[in-house]
Image (cartoon, rainbow, N blue to C red):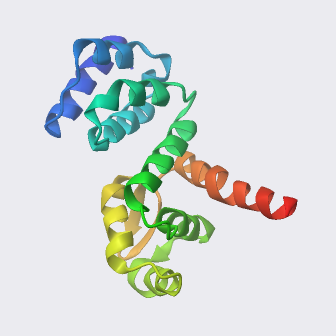
């Protein structure tokens, strides 16, 4: 995307969510080289629209723009999701995303994912709130969901699968 297209997209997407950035924040985002990638830009804007700490918005923008590609940005998104949806440290985000990552062709939300998560003490309400927040990152065929793109799958793998196997190997 050209810089003018990026600036227009920033305003359009955030306006649709009732959000607005300062001119300086818009300029920072529109001129960052990573935001030439439409997926990176849209993911960044979705994250900023959901980010609930206005006083820390400049810091969040800076942090997100340190990501060199969309997969790195997704890792930052996953960390924010953990803060937002796993305040009781049950591992809601980790369990939910890891299970979908481990499935070959996705999981049926009602008949496969729910029983597995319930065995881990995670209620339907807990994982459904998370799912609704990031529903755009999934594709669904009926009740079966899987990741919408390889970059998000790679971020989940790097965050939970590789980190877990590295930790387990060192213990």
Of residue 9 and residue 18, the one placed in the foreground of this image is 18
Left or right: 57 in relation to 21: right
**Does residue 65 lie above or below 105 as drawn?**
above
Left or right: 12 in relation to 145: left
**Does residue 120 lie above or below 162 as drawn?**
below
Of residue 141 and residue 73, the one placed in the foreground of this image is 73
Q: Residue at x 68, y 60 (%)?
A: 161
Res 134 quadrant in image: bottom left
Q: Position of residue 164 (x, y in %)?
A: 72, 61
> Which quadrant of the rendered structure holds the N terminus?
top left
Q: Position of residue 168 (x, y in %)?
A: 80, 64
Q: Position of residue 110 (x, y in %)?
A: 39, 83
**Does residue 15 lie above or below 96 as drawn?**
above
Q: Residue at x 39, y 60 (%)?
A: 85
Left or right: 166 in relation to 139: right
Of residue 8 and residue 50, the one placed in the foreground of this image is 50
């Amino acid at each position: 995307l050209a810089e003018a297209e990026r600036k227009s997209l920033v305003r359009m997407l955030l306006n649709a969510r009732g959000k607005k950035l300062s001119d300086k924040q818009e300029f920072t985002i529109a001129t960052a080289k990573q935001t030439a990638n439409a997926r990176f830009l849209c993911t960044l804007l979705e994250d900023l629209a959901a980010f609930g700490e206005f006083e820390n918005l400049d810091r969040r923008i800076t942090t997100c723009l340190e990501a060199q590609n969309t997969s790195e940005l997704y890792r930052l998104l996953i960390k924010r999701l953990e803060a937002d949806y796993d305040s009781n440290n049950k591992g809601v985000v980790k369990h939910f995303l890891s299970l979908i990552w481990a499935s070959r062709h996705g999981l049926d939300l009602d008949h496969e994912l729910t029983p597995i998560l319930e065995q881990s003490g995670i209620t339907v309400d807990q994982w459904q709130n998370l799912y609704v927040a990031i529903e755009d990152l999934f594709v669904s065929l009926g009740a079966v969901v899987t990741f919408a793109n390889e970059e998000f799958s790679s971020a989940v793998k790097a965050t939970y699968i590789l980190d877990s196997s590295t930790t387990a190997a060192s213990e």
